[in-house]
Image (tube, grey):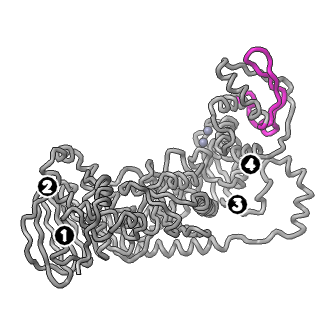
Amino acid sequence: MSVIQIMDEDLANKIAAGEVVERTMNVVKELVENAIDAKSTEIKIELIDAGIKEIRVIDNGIGMNKEDAVLAFSRHATSKLKTLDDLFHIHSLGFRGEALPSIAAVSHLVLKTSDGKEGTLVEIDGGKMKDVTSCDLRKGCDITVSDLFYNTPVRLKYLKNMYTELAHITDYVHKMALSYPMIQFQLKNNGKLLLSTDGSNRLLKVINDIYGLAVTKKMVEINGENDDYLVHGYISYPELMKSNRNAITVLVNGRFIKNNELNKIITESYHTYMPPDKYPIVILSIEADPILIDVNVHPTKMDIKFSKMETLKELITSLITDKLEHLTLIPDASVTTVVEGNSTKISNHYSTPTTQEFDYVVKEKEFENYEKMTLNLEVKKEDEVIDSLKDKEERDALPFDDEDEDETPRMKEMYPVGLVHGTYIVAENEDGMFLIDQHAANERINYEYYLAEMSRPKKEKMDLLVPITVELPTNEYLILKENFNVLEDLGFLFEEFGRNTIIIRTIPLWLRRSREEDAIHKIIDIIVETEDFKSEKFFHYIAATVACKASIKANDFITLDEMRTLLSRLRSCKNPFTCPHGRPTVITYSKYELERLFKRAM
Ligand code: ZN
Ligand code: ZN
Protein backbone atom coordinates (compact mmCIF):
# COMPACT_ATOMS: atom_id res chain seq x y z
CA MET A 1 0.00 0.00 0.00
CA SER A 2 1.13 3.53 -0.69
CA VAL A 3 2.42 5.47 2.36
CA ILE A 4 1.88 8.80 0.69
CA GLN A 5 -1.53 10.38 0.98
CA ILE A 6 -3.11 13.26 -0.84
CA MET A 7 -3.74 16.11 1.55
CA ASP A 8 -6.59 18.54 1.39
CA GLU A 9 -6.46 21.84 -0.44
CA ASP A 10 -6.68 24.05 2.65
CA LEU A 11 -3.61 22.49 4.21
CA ALA A 12 -1.73 22.58 0.94
CA ASN A 13 -2.23 26.31 0.64
CA LYS A 14 -1.32 26.92 4.25
CA ILE A 15 1.96 25.16 3.84
CA ALA A 16 2.75 26.53 0.42
CA ALA A 17 2.54 30.04 1.86
CA GLY A 18 5.53 29.44 4.05
CA GLU A 19 7.30 26.92 1.93
CA VAL A 20 9.03 28.77 -0.81
CA VAL A 21 12.39 27.53 -1.91
CA GLU A 22 14.65 30.49 -1.38
CA ARG A 23 18.11 29.09 -0.83
CA THR A 24 20.09 25.96 -1.41
CA MET A 25 19.72 25.40 2.33
CA ASN A 26 15.94 24.97 1.92
CA VAL A 27 16.59 22.14 -0.52
CA VAL A 28 19.12 20.44 1.73
CA LYS A 29 16.71 20.83 4.64
CA GLU A 30 13.83 19.29 2.75
CA LEU A 31 15.86 16.34 1.55
CA VAL A 32 17.55 15.67 4.88
CA GLU A 33 14.29 15.85 6.81
CA ASN A 34 12.66 13.48 4.35
CA ALA A 35 15.57 11.13 4.93
CA ILE A 36 15.09 11.36 8.70
CA ASP A 37 11.35 10.74 8.39
CA ALA A 38 12.21 7.69 6.27
CA LYS A 39 14.05 6.30 9.34
CA SER A 40 17.52 6.56 7.84
CA THR A 41 20.54 5.88 10.02
CA GLU A 42 23.02 7.18 7.44
CA ILE A 43 22.62 10.45 5.55
CA LYS A 44 25.22 11.70 3.10
CA ILE A 45 25.04 15.21 1.67
CA GLU A 46 27.29 15.96 -1.28
CA LEU A 47 27.40 19.47 -2.68
CA ILE A 48 29.04 20.95 -5.73
CA ASP A 49 29.65 24.70 -5.41
CA ALA A 50 27.69 24.98 -2.18
CA GLY A 51 24.75 23.24 -3.80
CA ILE A 52 24.28 25.82 -6.51
CA LYS A 53 25.57 23.38 -9.11
CA GLU A 54 24.44 20.19 -7.44
CA ILE A 55 22.94 18.82 -4.21
CA ARG A 56 22.95 15.09 -3.70
CA VAL A 57 21.47 13.43 -0.63
CA ILE A 58 21.85 9.69 -0.14
CA ASP A 59 20.11 7.86 2.67
CA ASN A 60 19.47 4.30 3.80
CA GLY A 61 15.86 4.85 4.86
CA ILE A 62 12.75 2.88 3.99
CA GLY A 63 12.68 4.15 0.40
CA MET A 64 9.67 4.29 -1.88
CA ASN A 65 7.92 2.06 -4.35
CA LYS A 66 7.25 3.20 -7.89
CA GLU A 67 3.79 4.58 -7.13
CA ASP A 68 5.02 6.73 -4.20
CA ALA A 69 8.06 7.93 -6.09
CA VAL A 70 5.84 9.41 -8.78
CA LEU A 71 3.24 10.68 -6.32
CA ALA A 72 5.95 12.47 -4.31
CA PHE A 73 6.16 15.11 -7.03
CA SER A 74 2.48 15.84 -7.34
CA ARG A 75 1.75 19.11 -5.62
CA HIS A 76 -0.59 17.95 -2.93
CA ALA A 77 1.11 14.82 -1.80
CA THR A 78 2.46 14.30 1.64
CA SER A 79 3.18 11.24 3.66
CA LYS A 80 2.90 13.06 6.91
CA LEU A 81 -0.09 15.31 7.07
CA LYS A 82 -3.72 14.69 6.48
CA THR A 83 -5.61 17.56 8.05
CA LEU A 84 -4.74 21.00 9.32
CA ASP A 85 -5.19 19.74 12.84
CA ASP A 86 -2.35 17.27 12.33
CA LEU A 87 -0.01 20.12 11.59
CA PHE A 88 -0.05 21.08 15.26
CA HIS A 89 0.18 17.66 16.77
CA ILE A 90 2.75 16.25 14.54
CA HIS A 91 5.51 14.16 16.03
CA SER A 92 7.60 13.63 12.94
CA LEU A 93 9.49 16.59 11.47
CA GLY A 94 6.47 17.33 9.39
CA PHE A 95 5.44 20.46 7.53
CA ARG A 96 6.75 19.26 4.23
CA GLY A 97 5.89 17.12 1.30
CA GLU A 98 4.92 20.26 -0.51
CA ALA A 99 8.48 21.44 -1.01
CA LEU A 100 9.59 18.52 -3.16
CA PRO A 101 7.46 19.55 -6.18
CA SER A 102 8.63 23.15 -5.67
CA ILE A 103 12.25 22.04 -5.80
CA ALA A 104 11.59 19.93 -8.88
CA ALA A 105 10.03 22.97 -10.54
CA VAL A 106 13.24 25.01 -10.41
CA SER A 107 15.91 22.35 -11.09
CA HIS A 108 16.93 19.17 -12.82
CA LEU A 109 16.05 16.41 -10.42
CA VAL A 110 16.88 12.73 -10.44
CA LEU A 111 15.40 10.49 -7.76
CA LYS A 112 16.61 6.94 -7.38
CA THR A 113 14.83 4.99 -4.71
CA SER A 114 14.11 1.49 -3.58
CA ASP A 115 11.85 0.03 -0.91
CA GLY A 116 14.00 -3.09 -0.95
CA LYS A 117 11.81 -4.84 -3.53
CA GLU A 118 11.92 -2.67 -6.63
CA GLY A 119 14.19 0.19 -7.65
CA THR A 120 12.73 3.25 -9.37
CA LEU A 121 14.32 6.15 -11.18
CA VAL A 122 12.36 9.38 -11.70
CA GLU A 123 13.77 12.23 -13.75
CA ILE A 124 12.22 15.70 -13.73
CA ASP A 125 13.23 18.83 -15.60
CA GLY A 126 11.88 22.19 -14.50
CA GLY A 127 8.81 20.48 -13.05
CA LYS A 128 8.15 18.23 -16.08
CA MET A 129 8.32 14.49 -15.54
CA LYS A 130 10.83 13.20 -18.16
CA ASP A 131 11.30 9.60 -17.30
CA VAL A 132 10.20 6.87 -14.89
CA THR A 133 12.18 3.65 -15.17
CA SER A 134 13.39 0.78 -13.08
CA CYS A 135 16.88 0.84 -11.64
CA ASP A 136 19.13 -1.01 -9.21
CA LEU A 137 19.55 0.44 -5.76
CA ARG A 138 19.77 -0.82 -2.21
CA LYS A 139 16.99 0.29 0.12
CA GLY A 140 16.81 4.06 0.55
CA CYS A 141 16.85 7.21 -1.53
CA ASP A 142 19.46 8.91 -3.66
CA ILE A 143 18.29 12.32 -4.87
CA THR A 144 20.32 14.67 -7.04
CA VAL A 145 19.14 18.24 -7.54
CA SER A 146 21.24 20.11 -10.07
CA ASP A 147 21.31 23.58 -11.59
CA LEU A 148 18.97 24.93 -8.95
CA PHE A 149 17.02 27.98 -10.14
CA TYR A 150 18.33 27.45 -13.71
CA ASN A 151 14.94 28.53 -15.08
CA THR A 152 14.49 31.53 -12.77
CA PRO A 153 16.11 34.97 -12.57
CA VAL A 154 17.26 34.47 -8.94
CA ARG A 155 20.02 32.12 -10.05
CA LEU A 156 22.55 34.87 -10.69
CA LYS A 157 22.10 36.27 -7.21
CA TYR A 158 23.04 32.94 -5.67
CA LEU A 159 26.10 32.41 -7.79
CA LYS A 160 27.58 35.43 -6.05
CA ASN A 161 26.85 34.17 -2.57
CA MET A 162 28.39 30.74 -2.58
CA TYR A 163 30.03 31.03 0.83
CA THR A 164 26.91 32.37 2.45
CA GLU A 165 24.98 29.42 1.09
CA LEU A 166 27.61 27.02 2.34
CA ALA A 167 27.60 28.66 5.77
CA HIS A 168 23.82 28.25 6.01
CA ILE A 169 23.95 24.63 4.95
CA THR A 170 26.83 23.79 7.29
CA ASP A 171 25.04 25.44 10.19
CA TYR A 172 21.88 23.51 9.41
CA VAL A 173 23.65 20.15 9.11
CA HIS A 174 25.48 20.84 12.40
CA LYS A 175 22.16 21.38 14.14
CA MET A 176 20.69 18.23 12.64
CA ALA A 177 23.75 16.23 13.68
CA LEU A 178 23.34 17.58 17.22
CA SER A 179 19.62 16.77 17.15
CA TYR A 180 20.20 13.23 15.90
CA PRO A 181 23.42 11.89 17.37
CA MET A 182 22.15 8.41 16.51
CA ILE A 183 22.27 9.19 12.79
CA GLN A 184 25.50 9.13 10.85
CA PHE A 185 25.87 12.40 8.92
CA GLN A 186 28.37 13.21 6.26
CA LEU A 187 28.67 16.58 4.53
CA LYS A 188 30.96 17.27 1.57
CA ASN A 189 31.44 20.28 -0.66
CA ASN A 190 33.39 19.84 -3.90
CA GLY A 191 34.70 16.55 -2.56
CA LYS A 192 35.99 18.10 0.64
CA LEU A 193 34.76 16.60 3.90
CA LEU A 194 33.13 19.26 6.13
CA LEU A 195 31.50 17.07 8.73
CA SER A 196 31.39 13.43 9.59
CA THR A 197 29.61 12.00 12.62
CA ASP A 198 29.57 8.36 13.60
CA GLY A 199 25.95 7.85 14.65
CA SER A 200 27.03 6.36 17.97
CA ASN A 201 24.38 8.38 19.83
CA ARG A 202 26.87 10.31 21.96
CA LEU A 203 26.11 14.03 21.98
CA LEU A 204 29.58 14.94 23.23
CA LYS A 205 31.08 13.05 20.30
CA VAL A 206 29.03 15.13 17.85
CA ILE A 207 30.15 18.31 19.65
CA ASN A 208 33.70 17.07 19.15
CA ASP A 209 33.09 16.39 15.45
CA ILE A 210 31.70 19.88 14.95
CA TYR A 211 33.79 22.10 17.22
CA GLY A 212 36.95 20.07 17.73
CA LEU A 213 38.75 18.76 20.76
CA ALA A 214 39.80 22.11 22.30
CA VAL A 215 36.14 23.09 22.61
CA THR A 216 34.98 19.65 23.72
CA LYS A 217 37.42 19.78 26.63
CA LYS A 218 35.76 22.98 27.80
CA MET A 219 32.17 21.74 27.69
CA VAL A 220 30.36 20.59 30.83
CA GLU A 221 27.26 18.54 31.11
CA ILE A 222 24.06 19.82 32.71
CA ASN A 223 21.12 17.71 33.69
CA GLY A 224 17.94 18.50 35.56
CA GLU A 225 14.20 18.44 35.66
CA ASN A 226 11.13 19.96 37.27
CA ASP A 227 7.49 18.90 37.12
CA ASP A 228 7.10 20.01 33.54
CA TYR A 229 10.45 19.88 31.82
CA LEU A 230 13.51 17.71 31.52
CA VAL A 231 16.69 19.47 30.42
CA HIS A 232 19.93 17.87 29.35
CA GLY A 233 22.91 19.18 27.45
CA TYR A 234 26.34 20.74 27.40
CA ILE A 235 27.41 24.28 28.19
CA SER A 236 30.77 25.87 27.52
CA TYR A 237 33.22 27.41 29.96
CA PRO A 238 32.78 31.20 29.71
CA GLU A 239 36.24 31.52 28.14
CA LEU A 240 34.86 29.91 24.97
CA MET A 241 33.27 33.02 23.58
CA LYS A 242 31.52 33.39 20.27
CA SER A 243 30.58 36.72 18.79
CA ASN A 244 27.13 35.52 17.72
CA ARG A 245 24.31 33.33 18.99
CA ASN A 246 24.87 30.70 16.33
CA ALA A 247 26.44 28.21 18.68
CA ILE A 248 23.41 28.10 20.94
CA THR A 249 21.43 25.07 19.85
CA VAL A 250 18.10 24.29 21.47
CA LEU A 251 16.22 21.08 20.80
CA VAL A 252 12.69 20.49 21.97
CA ASN A 253 11.57 16.88 21.98
CA GLY A 254 14.46 16.14 19.67
CA ARG A 255 13.58 18.88 17.25
CA PHE A 256 15.76 21.89 16.57
CA ILE A 257 14.01 25.20 17.27
CA LYS A 258 14.88 28.89 17.25
CA ASN A 259 13.51 30.76 20.21
CA ASN A 260 14.81 34.20 21.15
CA GLU A 261 13.51 34.01 24.68
CA LEU A 262 15.41 30.80 25.38
CA ASN A 263 18.56 32.22 23.79
CA LYS A 264 18.24 35.22 26.08
CA ILE A 265 17.74 33.06 29.17
CA ILE A 266 20.85 31.07 28.31
CA THR A 267 23.00 34.14 27.59
CA GLU A 268 21.83 35.91 30.73
CA SER A 269 22.80 32.93 32.84
CA TYR A 270 26.38 33.83 31.89
CA HIS A 271 25.91 37.36 33.22
CA THR A 272 29.27 38.91 34.25
CA TYR A 273 31.03 35.70 33.31
CA MET A 274 31.23 36.97 29.77
CA PRO A 275 31.21 40.39 28.08
CA PRO A 276 27.64 41.32 27.12
CA ASP A 277 28.29 41.11 23.38
CA LYS A 278 29.67 37.56 23.57
CA TYR A 279 27.83 34.26 23.58
CA PRO A 280 28.55 30.79 24.92
CA ILE A 281 28.42 27.48 23.10
CA VAL A 282 25.38 25.63 24.40
CA ILE A 283 23.56 22.53 23.28
CA LEU A 284 20.36 22.13 25.22
CA SER A 285 17.84 19.38 24.80
CA ILE A 286 14.45 20.01 26.39
CA GLU A 287 11.85 17.32 26.82
CA ALA A 288 8.29 18.34 27.51
CA ASP A 289 4.76 17.08 27.22
CA PRO A 290 3.57 18.25 23.76
CA ILE A 291 0.57 19.80 25.55
CA LEU A 292 2.93 22.48 26.92
CA ILE A 293 4.17 23.38 23.46
CA ASP A 294 2.47 25.60 20.97
CA VAL A 295 3.93 25.24 17.51
CA ASN A 296 4.18 28.59 15.79
CA VAL A 297 1.64 29.00 13.05
CA HIS A 298 4.33 29.78 10.52
CA PRO A 299 5.93 26.43 9.81
CA THR A 300 9.27 27.67 8.46
CA LYS A 301 10.16 29.73 11.50
CA MET A 302 11.07 26.71 13.58
CA ASP A 303 9.77 28.63 16.59
CA ILE A 304 7.47 27.40 19.31
CA LYS A 305 5.82 28.76 22.45
CA PHE A 306 5.95 27.19 25.89
CA SER A 307 2.91 27.50 28.09
CA LYS A 308 4.96 27.31 31.29
CA MET A 309 7.89 29.50 30.28
CA GLU A 310 8.57 30.73 33.82
CA THR A 311 9.28 27.29 35.26
CA LEU A 312 11.41 26.45 32.23
CA LYS A 313 13.35 29.68 32.68
CA GLU A 314 13.98 28.94 36.34
CA LEU A 315 15.17 25.45 35.54
CA ILE A 316 17.60 26.47 32.80
CA THR A 317 18.93 29.48 34.72
CA SER A 318 19.57 27.48 37.87
CA LEU A 319 21.19 24.61 35.97
CA ILE A 320 23.64 26.93 34.20
CA THR A 321 24.41 29.24 37.12
CA ASP A 322 24.85 26.32 39.54
CA LYS A 323 27.24 24.69 37.12
CA LEU A 324 29.24 27.87 36.56
CA GLU A 325 29.38 28.43 40.32
CA HIS A 326 31.15 25.14 40.83
CA LEU A 327 33.77 25.33 38.14
CA THR A 328 37.29 26.63 38.36
CA LEU A 329 37.36 29.03 35.47
CA ILE A 330 40.93 30.19 35.08
CA PRO A 331 41.75 30.27 31.38
CA ASP A 332 45.01 28.67 30.34
CA ALA A 333 47.32 31.40 29.04
CA SER A 334 49.01 29.18 26.49
CA VAL A 335 45.87 27.95 24.78
CA THR A 336 43.77 30.14 22.54
CA THR A 337 40.27 29.07 23.27
CA VAL A 338 38.36 31.98 21.89
CA VAL A 339 36.29 30.59 19.08
CA GLU A 340 35.65 33.14 16.41
CA GLY A 341 34.56 33.25 12.84
CA ASN A 342 31.67 31.51 11.15
CA SER A 343 31.02 28.08 9.89
CA THR A 344 32.40 28.70 6.40
CA LYS A 345 35.84 28.67 7.92
CA ILE A 346 35.33 25.16 9.15
CA SER A 347 36.44 23.76 5.82
CA ASN A 348 39.89 25.20 6.47
CA HIS A 349 40.54 23.66 9.83
CA TYR A 350 38.41 20.60 9.85
CA SER A 351 40.27 17.71 11.33
CA THR A 352 39.12 14.50 12.85
CA PRO A 353 40.53 14.01 16.31
CA THR A 354 41.25 10.36 16.90
CA THR A 355 38.75 8.32 18.81
CA GLN A 356 41.40 7.64 21.45
CA GLU A 357 41.90 11.33 22.10
CA PHE A 358 38.18 11.81 22.39
CA ASP A 359 37.73 8.87 24.73
CA TYR A 360 40.42 10.33 26.93
CA VAL A 361 38.53 13.62 27.17
CA VAL A 362 35.34 11.79 28.06
CA LYS A 363 37.10 9.90 30.86
CA GLU A 364 38.66 13.10 32.14
CA LYS A 365 35.22 14.69 32.22
CA GLU A 366 33.63 11.84 34.11
CA PHE A 367 36.39 12.15 36.67
CA GLU A 368 35.89 15.91 36.93
CA ASN A 369 32.19 15.41 37.56
CA TYR A 370 32.96 12.91 40.26
CA GLU A 371 35.36 15.32 41.92
CA LYS A 372 32.75 18.01 41.87
CA MET A 373 30.17 15.78 43.48
CA THR A 374 32.42 15.15 46.44
CA LEU A 375 32.56 18.87 47.19
CA ASN A 376 32.69 19.93 50.78
CA LEU A 377 29.29 19.02 52.14
CA GLU A 378 30.04 19.59 55.81
CA VAL A 379 27.12 20.69 57.91
CA LYS A 380 27.67 23.74 60.05
CA LYS A 381 27.98 22.75 63.69
CA GLU A 382 25.76 24.30 66.30
CA ASP A 383 28.51 26.16 68.19
CA GLU A 384 29.78 27.57 64.96
CA VAL A 385 26.38 29.06 64.32
CA ILE A 386 26.37 30.55 67.80
CA ASP A 387 29.93 31.80 67.34
CA SER A 388 29.04 33.43 64.12
CA LEU A 389 26.13 35.19 65.78
CA LYS A 390 28.39 36.46 68.50
CA ASP A 391 30.75 37.98 66.00
CA LYS A 392 28.03 39.26 63.83
CA GLU A 393 28.37 42.89 64.77
CA GLU A 394 32.09 42.79 64.27
CA ARG A 395 31.62 40.94 61.05
CA ASP A 396 29.16 43.45 59.71
CA ALA A 397 31.86 46.07 59.97
CA LEU A 398 34.06 43.95 57.71
CA PRO A 399 32.87 44.28 54.19
CA PHE A 400 33.92 40.89 52.86
CA ASP A 401 32.98 37.93 54.88
CA ASP A 402 29.31 37.91 55.60
CA GLU A 403 27.13 35.10 54.17
CA ASP A 404 28.58 32.08 52.42
CA GLU A 405 31.49 32.06 54.83
CA ASP A 406 31.55 28.31 55.04
CA GLU A 407 31.60 27.94 51.31
CA THR A 408 34.84 26.58 49.91
CA PRO A 409 36.62 29.29 47.93
CA ARG A 410 36.49 28.55 44.25
CA MET A 411 40.12 29.45 43.77
CA LYS A 412 43.20 28.02 45.42
CA GLU A 413 45.40 30.36 47.38
CA MET A 414 47.94 32.20 45.22
CA TYR A 415 51.11 33.87 46.48
CA PRO A 416 52.18 37.10 44.79
CA VAL A 417 55.77 37.48 43.60
CA GLY A 418 55.65 40.80 41.84
CA LEU A 419 54.02 43.22 39.46
CA VAL A 420 54.42 43.52 35.69
CA HIS A 421 53.84 46.85 33.91
CA GLY A 422 52.19 48.17 37.06
CA THR A 423 49.14 46.19 35.96
CA TYR A 424 49.52 42.45 36.25
CA ILE A 425 50.25 40.66 39.47
CA VAL A 426 52.45 37.59 39.04
CA ALA A 427 51.55 34.90 41.55
CA GLU A 428 52.21 31.24 42.10
CA ASN A 429 51.09 28.13 43.89
CA GLU A 430 51.78 24.41 43.52
CA ASP A 431 49.59 24.25 40.38
CA GLY A 432 51.48 26.82 38.37
CA MET A 433 51.94 30.49 37.65
CA PHE A 434 49.15 33.08 37.55
CA LEU A 435 48.77 36.52 36.07
CA ILE A 436 46.11 38.66 37.71
CA ASP A 437 44.80 41.89 36.21
CA GLN A 438 44.83 44.11 39.31
CA HIS A 439 42.11 46.44 38.07
CA ALA A 440 39.78 43.63 36.97
CA ALA A 441 40.36 41.75 40.24
CA ASN A 442 39.72 44.84 42.35
CA GLU A 443 36.67 45.63 40.27
CA ARG A 444 35.18 42.19 40.94
CA ILE A 445 35.78 42.54 44.68
CA ASN A 446 34.20 45.98 44.79
CA TYR A 447 31.34 44.93 42.54
CA GLU A 448 30.25 42.08 44.77
CA TYR A 449 30.60 44.33 47.79
CA TYR A 450 28.47 47.13 46.34
CA LEU A 451 25.88 44.73 45.04
CA ALA A 452 25.49 43.11 48.46
CA GLU A 453 25.32 46.50 50.19
CA MET A 454 22.80 47.91 47.77
CA SER A 455 20.42 45.03 48.21
CA ARG A 456 20.42 45.33 51.99
CA PRO A 457 16.96 46.56 53.01
CA LYS A 458 18.27 48.84 55.78
CA LYS A 459 21.23 50.87 54.69
CA GLU A 460 23.67 52.43 57.10
CA LYS A 461 24.30 56.06 56.37
CA MET A 462 26.95 58.61 57.10
CA ASP A 463 26.85 62.39 57.10
CA LEU A 464 29.22 64.21 54.81
CA LEU A 465 31.52 66.77 56.38
CA VAL A 466 31.20 68.85 53.27
CA PRO A 467 27.83 68.41 51.53
CA ILE A 468 27.93 67.83 47.79
CA THR A 469 25.79 69.85 45.40
CA VAL A 470 24.77 68.51 42.03
CA GLU A 471 23.43 70.81 39.35
CA LEU A 472 21.86 69.40 36.21
CA PRO A 473 20.43 70.76 32.96
CA THR A 474 16.65 71.21 33.25
CA ASN A 475 15.67 68.14 31.22
CA GLU A 476 17.88 65.85 33.29
CA TYR A 477 16.86 67.46 36.54
CA LEU A 478 13.19 66.78 35.77
CA ILE A 479 13.91 63.10 35.25
CA LEU A 480 15.92 63.00 38.45
CA LYS A 481 13.17 64.76 40.38
CA GLU A 482 10.68 62.21 39.23
CA ASN A 483 13.00 59.54 40.63
CA PHE A 484 14.07 61.07 43.92
CA ASN A 485 12.73 57.94 45.61
CA VAL A 486 15.32 55.82 43.76
CA LEU A 487 18.09 57.98 45.16
CA GLU A 488 16.52 57.73 48.63
CA ASP A 489 16.22 53.95 48.32
CA LEU A 490 19.91 53.78 47.55
CA GLY A 491 20.56 55.48 50.91
CA PHE A 492 21.06 59.16 50.06
CA LEU A 493 19.60 62.05 52.07
CA PHE A 494 19.32 65.31 50.15
CA GLU A 495 17.14 68.32 49.46
CA GLU A 496 16.40 70.63 46.60
CA PHE A 497 18.72 73.58 46.68
CA GLY A 498 17.86 76.33 44.25
CA ARG A 499 17.43 75.94 40.53
CA ASN A 500 18.01 72.44 39.11
CA THR A 501 20.25 71.61 42.05
CA ILE A 502 20.21 69.20 44.93
CA ILE A 503 22.42 69.23 47.96
CA ILE A 504 23.43 65.85 49.33
CA ARG A 505 24.21 65.79 53.04
CA THR A 506 24.13 62.08 53.82
CA ILE A 507 25.34 59.12 51.76
CA PRO A 508 25.09 55.35 52.22
CA LEU A 509 28.00 53.98 54.18
CA TRP A 510 29.05 51.65 51.41
CA LEU A 511 29.93 54.56 49.20
CA ARG A 512 32.69 55.53 51.61
CA ARG A 513 35.05 53.13 49.91
CA SER A 514 35.03 55.07 46.66
CA ARG A 515 35.72 58.57 45.54
CA GLU A 516 32.33 59.79 46.72
CA GLU A 517 31.80 62.80 44.55
CA ASP A 518 32.73 60.94 41.38
CA ALA A 519 30.54 58.02 42.34
CA ILE A 520 27.54 60.26 43.12
CA HIS A 521 27.76 61.94 39.74
CA LYS A 522 27.97 58.53 38.05
CA ILE A 523 24.96 57.24 39.95
CA ILE A 524 22.89 60.29 39.05
CA ASP A 525 23.91 59.88 35.41
CA ILE A 526 22.70 56.30 35.50
CA ILE A 527 19.40 57.27 37.13
CA VAL A 528 18.83 59.90 34.46
CA GLU A 529 19.57 57.41 31.68
CA THR A 530 17.81 54.34 33.05
CA GLU A 531 14.21 53.43 32.50
CA ASP A 532 13.74 50.43 34.72
CA PHE A 533 14.91 51.01 38.29
CA LYS A 534 13.31 47.93 39.66
CA SER A 535 15.40 45.50 37.68
CA GLU A 536 18.50 43.70 38.83
CA LYS A 537 20.22 45.24 35.85
CA PHE A 538 19.95 48.70 37.36
CA PHE A 539 21.77 47.56 40.50
CA HIS A 540 24.27 45.60 38.44
CA TYR A 541 25.02 48.66 36.35
CA ILE A 542 25.46 50.98 39.34
CA ALA A 543 27.61 48.44 41.18
CA ALA A 544 29.78 47.77 38.12
CA THR A 545 30.23 51.47 37.37
CA VAL A 546 31.03 52.51 40.91
CA ALA A 547 33.30 49.47 41.29
CA CYS A 548 35.28 50.49 38.22
CA LYS A 549 35.69 54.03 39.56
CA ALA A 550 36.75 52.81 42.98
CA SER A 551 39.31 50.26 41.81
CA ILE A 552 43.06 50.56 41.44
CA LYS A 553 44.06 51.44 37.92
CA ALA A 554 46.78 50.23 35.67
CA ASN A 555 50.13 51.83 36.55
CA ASP A 556 49.26 51.96 40.23
CA PHE A 557 52.31 50.29 41.71
CA ILE A 558 50.92 48.39 44.66
CA THR A 559 53.03 46.67 47.32
CA LEU A 560 53.34 42.92 47.88
CA ASP A 561 51.20 43.29 50.99
CA GLU A 562 48.48 45.03 49.02
CA MET A 563 48.70 42.27 46.44
CA ARG A 564 48.23 39.67 49.14
CA THR A 565 45.14 41.45 50.45
CA LEU A 566 43.76 41.85 46.96
CA LEU A 567 44.24 38.16 46.13
CA SER A 568 42.69 36.93 49.35
CA ARG A 569 39.69 39.18 48.83
CA LEU A 570 39.39 38.00 45.26
CA ARG A 571 39.40 34.43 46.50
CA SER A 572 36.43 35.10 48.73
CA CYS A 573 34.32 36.40 45.85
CA LYS A 574 31.35 34.41 44.62
CA ASN A 575 32.82 34.55 41.13
CA PRO A 576 36.51 35.39 41.36
CA PHE A 577 37.21 34.62 37.70
CA THR A 578 35.77 37.57 35.77
CA CYS A 579 35.23 41.27 36.32
CA PRO A 580 31.63 42.60 36.23
CA HIS A 581 32.11 43.27 32.53
CA GLY A 582 32.94 39.63 31.84
CA ARG A 583 36.68 40.00 31.28
CA PRO A 584 38.99 37.50 33.00
CA THR A 585 40.62 38.53 36.29
CA VAL A 586 43.20 35.76 36.19
CA ILE A 587 44.92 33.52 33.65
CA THR A 588 47.34 30.70 34.30
CA TYR A 589 50.36 28.84 33.03
CA SER A 590 50.05 25.45 34.64
CA LYS A 591 53.12 23.81 36.09
CA TYR A 592 52.93 21.22 33.35
CA GLU A 593 52.57 23.88 30.67
CA LEU A 594 55.67 25.70 31.92
CA GLU A 595 57.63 22.45 31.89
CA ARG A 596 56.38 21.73 28.42
CA LEU A 597 57.28 25.20 27.15
CA PHE A 598 60.81 24.90 28.53
CA LYS A 599 61.06 21.36 27.17
CA ARG A 600 61.55 19.89 30.63
CA ALA A 601 58.57 17.68 29.96
CA MET A 602 57.46 16.46 26.57
ZN1 ZN B 1 37.06 49.09 34.92
ZN1 ZN C 1 35.70 45.39 34.05
> Which residues are the magenta region?
489-518
The residue carrying pointer 1 sits among few (fewer than 14), some (14 to 19) or many (20 or more) residues within 10 Å by Cα, namely some
* 282 horizontally vs 483: left or right: left
- Quadrant of the drawing holding the C terminus: bottom left
Cβ of mark 2 under 8 Å from ligand 2: the answer is no
Q: Which mark is residue 409?
A: 3
Q: Is residue 506 magenta?
A: yes
* 400 horizontally vs 523: left or right: right
Three-letter code, disc 4: Thr
Q: Is residue 159 magenta?
A: no
Looking at the image, tell me whether mark 4 or mark 2 is earlier in sequence order: 2
Where does the image place residue 481, in percent across and percent down from the top left?
A: 73, 25
Mark in front: 4 vs 2: 2
Q: Which residue is mark 4?
A: 565
Q: Quadrant of residue 81?
A: bottom left
Q: Residue at x 59, y 44 (%)?
A: 581
Mark in front: 3 vs 1: 1
Looking at the image, tell me whether mark 2 or mark 3 is earlier in sequence order: 2
Three-letter code, disc 2: Asp
Q: Which residue is mark 2?
A: 147
Looking at the image, tell me whether mark 1 or mark 2 is earlier in sequence order: 1
- Are the residues tagged 4 and 1 within 8 Å (C-beta)? no
Residue 520 in view (yes/no): yes
Mark pair 1, 2: CA separation: 23 Å
